[in-house]
Image (cartoon, coloured by chain):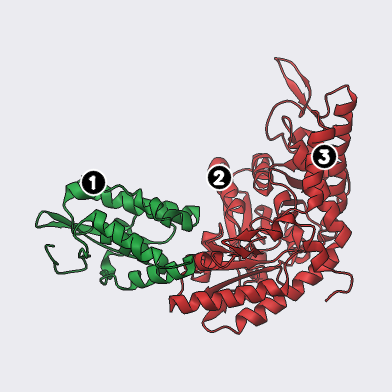
Chain colours: A green, B red
Amino acid sequence: MSGVIDGPWVAPEDDTASAAIAEIGAELDMFDEWMERYQYIIELGRKLPPFPSDWMNDAHRVPGCQSQVWLEAREQDGRLWFAGASDAAIVSGLVALLLRVYSGRPQSEILETSPQFLRDLGLVQALSTNRGNGVEAMAAAIRARAAAA
Amino acid sequence: MNAAFDVQAIRAQFPILSERVHGRPLVFLDSAASAQKPTCVIEAMARTMQTQYANIHRGLHWMSERTTAAYEGARDQVAGFIHANSRREIVFTRNSTEAINLVAYCFGSMLRPGDAVLISEMEHHSNIVPWQMLRDRAGIELRVAPITDTADIDLDAYEALLTDGHVRLVAITHMSNVLGTITPAQTLAEIAHRHGARILFDGSQSAVHRKIDVQALDADFFVLTGHKIYGPTGIGVLWAREELLEAMPPFMGGGEMIESVSFARSTWAKPPHKFEAGTPAIIEAIGLGAAIGFMQDIGPEAIAAHEAELVAYGRDRLGAMNALRILGDPAERGGVLSFTVDGAHPHDLATLLDHQGIAVRAGQHCAEPLMHRLGVHATTRASFGVYTTTDDIDALADGLERARQMLL
């Protein structure tokens, strides 16, 4: 895996986006109930690289989320790298989860990776409708950024 | 506990309370958003559709007359429930939002540039936006009465905003949906009247928690919504003094609200029908009548006493928790507690409570300006109803502690 770049960008842990999705699914499957899954998701959020506070503004805000979510992207080495954060803990974890799938990947791989996995893993359904829509809005924002690259 | 008040017997009348959420018993602490429905309401509506349904007021047949009698009977029940002078003062609307919009449109059409409407800092959006729309349409002024740090209306500032005599109408909450503050309605009305203003009370929250007597309040307008008082959605009430309903132009045009129609001109029916264009929410009005019957059987005083005990218990139980802050300390509080927990986003708390079977509301509660005044981005809100128990509050406190540990 071509590595890490400096800054708040999330580095891939898995070789491909689909491997990341499979790995996340396996990790979520280890838990019997959603309260445990949430604990795991909250901890993922805590491990996000620190997001620069001067990016926590409207220009970086993802519309359609009930909580505040901020996103930034840059291109380097033929890949798109994302940084993200939220003021809410569960949403931070979902940002971490999404960026594990999408950050540090080539544009084509991002566009080929449907956000359907959020539903397949039960993540959208486990949240209230508004928050579920918010997660999907985040995935859409990431893919829109890739499409514009 | 009130000897006559048997909360378990009341709970048995709410089928939904035996549902399970995420595999856990439902702890419903979101009644201020919408209350659950007792069997008598569910059955009254089903019975109407099964055995006595037809359109009202126009049918010259038995079924229509029976349905009309039931619909108009609901109007009598509302009139009794809020102690109106007469049934002609009761206008059915879709909800309190529509009732406020009706007043903003119809009473508002009699205002002129230079006139003012006064609201408060702790209004729901539905008692802000219609007045902003009126301001922009009619060139009137919109004034805002501040609240104190305890979350009571600042009475001195309130009166100061009225003294120049420009305020034609005060539109103010009778109970805050965020803080639970019960406003001193009689005092507010007395001050408003002394300065030549009419007064509208938004009773969306108060009508479920205490006895409403519009004559004792000396109100001019009072609005409430059916779904918050154990009735169905889609039915609300505007009460107004009869002379005001006589003086105001109609709201919407259509069938039912006219006396006669020609292509040259139409004449209006008498109030309240003047304000009820089109086929109304017949089944819902009958459901509302059943909900009022349900509340009257228990007694508004007994309900208020039960909820006062819950508020006191909730304040003690939640107030003892680390890092939890209950917002506001008003002189009088209905069955609503809003709070923040240090380091925990209200949305996270709501999600983690939901997965423990506990339903609360989190967010800005349709009261963004109040959030700014309180200096918070959002709150978590627990609200109580006639079926709420101290066990529910214990479950909330335990659930919050677990959520807080997860978010630490």
**Residue holding disc 1:** A111
Q: Is residue A107 above or below residue B146?
A: above
Q: Position of residue A89 (x, y in %)?
A: 40, 69
Q: Amino acid at mark 2?
A: Met
| Picture coordinates of residue A103, whole percent (x, y) | 22, 59
Q: Residue B350, image x and y in percent?
A: 53, 65
Cα gap from disc 1 to disc 2, whole angstroms = 44 Å
> Which quarter of the picture shows residue B178?
bottom right
Amino acid type, residue under disc 3 in the picture:
Arg
- Residue at x 22% of width, y 45% of height: A147
> Toward the viewer: B43 or B323?
B43
Amino acid type, label 1: Leu
Work out whether disc 1 and disc 2 sit on a shared chain: no
Task: State how far apart marks 3 and 2 are (Cα).
Answer: 41 Å
Which chain does the numbered disc 3 sit on?
B
Whole-percent x, y for residue B172 in the image: 67, 58
Residue B35 appears left or right of A148 = right
Q: Which residue is mark 3?
A: B47
> Helix, strand or loop at disc 1?
helix
Q: Is residue A46 left or right of residue B364?
A: left
Q: Which numbered circle lies on residue B133?
A: 2
